[in-house]
Image: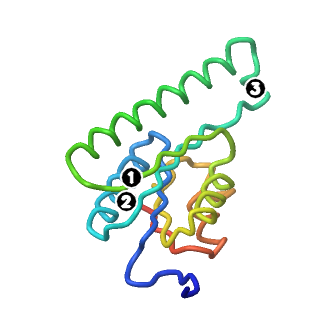
């Protein structure tokens, strides 16, 4: 058996982070097209943030969870509709947690050849760094950031 190699003959496993934002949906569409053209397996990852102290009011955590479930369900519906039109092998992973941590773990576990995410539109990320910047700095996979 030959040893595993990263990046041989194009990507075979692509991980795409999709959180429901406009840029992440564009990233998901780009990753879908790339997976279709390359015959790669696509792993679509939706990470819902964990409730912070400010949202732990009686209704805050429930509202956050409900919103995350709605976004996840919408992403799943769009994946199923696209799969009905085009032959793309995909997995859908949804978890609670920190987006960088979950994406990095899924990319490592799936032996991803590429990670695709949308650019952050949040002003604070210019100071503390976005998920995309953290993935690039990790340096373990090629990262494509879709505007």
Q: Examine the image and state in which quarter residue 27 appears.
A: bottom left
Identify the residue at horizontal 46%, vertical 66% (top origin): 13
Q: How far apart are the two marked residues, 2 and 3, measured between alpha carbons?
A: 34 Å
- Under circle 3, the secondary element is helix
On screen, 104 above or below 21?
A: below
On screen, 50 above or below 66?
A: below
Q: How far apart are the two marked residues, 1 and 3, measured between alpha carbons?
A: 30 Å
| Viewport quadrant of the N terminus | bottom right
Q: Which mark is residue 28?
A: 1
- Under circle 1, the secondary element is helix
Give the residue pinned by disc 3.
54
Q: Answer whether residue 126 is visible to the viewer in this image.
A: no
Give the residue pinned by disc 2.
31
Residues at circles 2 and 3 in contact by the CB criterion of under 8 Å: no
Q: Examine the image and state in which quarter residue 34 appears.
A: bottom left
Identify the residue at horizontal 41%, vertical 37% (top origin): 76
């Amino acid at each position: 058996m030959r040893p595993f190699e990263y990046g041989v003959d194009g990507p075979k496993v692509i991980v795409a982070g999709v959180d429901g934002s406009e840029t992440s949906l564009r990233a998901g569409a780009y990753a879908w097209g790339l997976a279709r053209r390359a015959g790669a397996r696509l792993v679509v990852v939706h990470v819902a943030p964990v409730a912070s102290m400010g949202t732990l009011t009686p209704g805050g955590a429930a509202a956050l969870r409900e919103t995350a479930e709605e976004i996840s369900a919408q992403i799943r519906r769009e994946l199923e509709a696209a799969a009905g039109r085009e032959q793309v092998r995909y997995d859908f992973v949804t978890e609670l947690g920190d987006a960088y941590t979950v994406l990095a773990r899924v990319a490592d576990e799936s032996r991803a050849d590429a990670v695709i995410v949308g650019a952050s539109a949040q002003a604070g990320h210019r100071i503390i760094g976005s998920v995309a910047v953290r993935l690039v700095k990790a340096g373990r996979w090629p990262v494509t950031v879709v505007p």
